[in-house]
């Protein structure tokens, strides 16, 4: 019985990779590496954007909760104040006692976060006419809008309606 014999001369002649194979491998590896760098860069940018939006939303919600904890108006019963914004003698936020005192409040570097600006608007609305913007007349509903701006992102806006708890069903 004859055993198969291998030709040692043939096997010994191919001991490594050719230059062409090495160049192809390097090109494929480089393209893959560059693609991965772009993917990681994109993911990092999206994570940063998400973090910024979360901070902006929390800053807006924080201010909204503070505003909503105040009374509807300076007067405890109708007739409500016709002028919005801080009343006479309310020069600092610690003196604000109703929600419309926050109208026009603009804060920069909010709560230690540099690069953020927070703006508050409060106005009367008439839900039978327009709930999006001021109707210019005193009603039993006020709309609160808190907007947080950043230099690198779209603004975040949080809205809320506050009723006086008087005559709300008469609309």
Image (cartoon, helix red, strand yellow):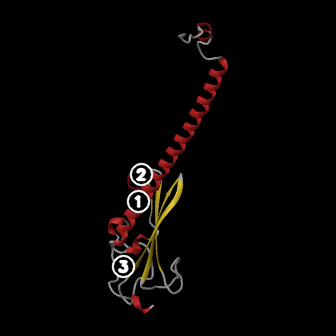
**Circles 2 and 1: CB atoms closer than 8 Å:** yes
The label on residue 70 is: none
Query: Helix, strand, or loop for circle 1?
Result: helix
Residue at image x 50%, y 79%?
Answer: 131
CA gap between label 3 and label 2 equals 29 Å
Query: Helix, strand, or loop for circle 2?
Result: loop
Q: Is residue 138 above or below residue 15?
A: below
Q: Is residue 93 visible?
A: yes
CA gap between label 1 and label 3 equals 22 Å
Residue at image x 61%, y 7%?
Answer: 9
- Per the image, the residue denoted by label 3 is 72
Of residues 150 and 36, which is closer to you in this image? 36
Residue at image x 53%, y 54%?
Answer: 153
Q: Is residue 87 visible?
A: no
Residue at image x 34%, y 83%?
Answer: 75
Q: Residues within 10 Å of mark 1 (few under 14, many from 20)?
A: many
**Circles 1 and 3: CB atoms closer than 8 Å:** no
Of residues 9 and 143, which is closer to you in this image? 9
Query: Helix, strand, or loop for circle 3?
Result: loop
Give whichever of discs 1 and 3 has the lower sequence position.
1
- Per the image, the residue denoted by label 1 is 59
- Per the image, the residue denoted by label 2 is 113
Of residues 75 and 45, which is closer to you in this image? 45
Give whichever of discs 3 and 2 has the lower sequence position.
3
| Residue 124 image position (x, y, % from top left) | 47, 80
């Amino acid at each position: 019985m004859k055993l198969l014999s291998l030709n040692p001369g043939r096997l010994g002649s191919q001991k490594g990779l050719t230059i062409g194979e090495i160049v192809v491998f390097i090109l494929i590896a480089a393209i893959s590496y560059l693609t991965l760098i772009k993917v990681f860069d994109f993911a990092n940018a999206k994570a940063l954007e998400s973090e910024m939006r979360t901070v902006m939303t929390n800053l807006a919600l924080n201010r909204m909760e503070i505003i909503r904890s105040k009374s509807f108006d300076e007067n405890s019963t109708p007739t409500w104040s016709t002028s919005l914004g801080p009343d006479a003698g309310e020069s600092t936020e610690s003196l604000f006692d109703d929600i419309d005192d926050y109208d026009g409040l603009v804060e920069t570097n909010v709560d230690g976060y540099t690069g953020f600006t927070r703006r508050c608007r409060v106005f009367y609305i008439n839900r039978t006419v327009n709930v999006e913007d001021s109707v210019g007349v005193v009603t039993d509903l006020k709309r609160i809008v808190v907007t947080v701006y950043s230099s690198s992102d779209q603004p975040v806006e949080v809205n809320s309606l506050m009723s006086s708890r008087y005559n709300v069903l008469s609309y």
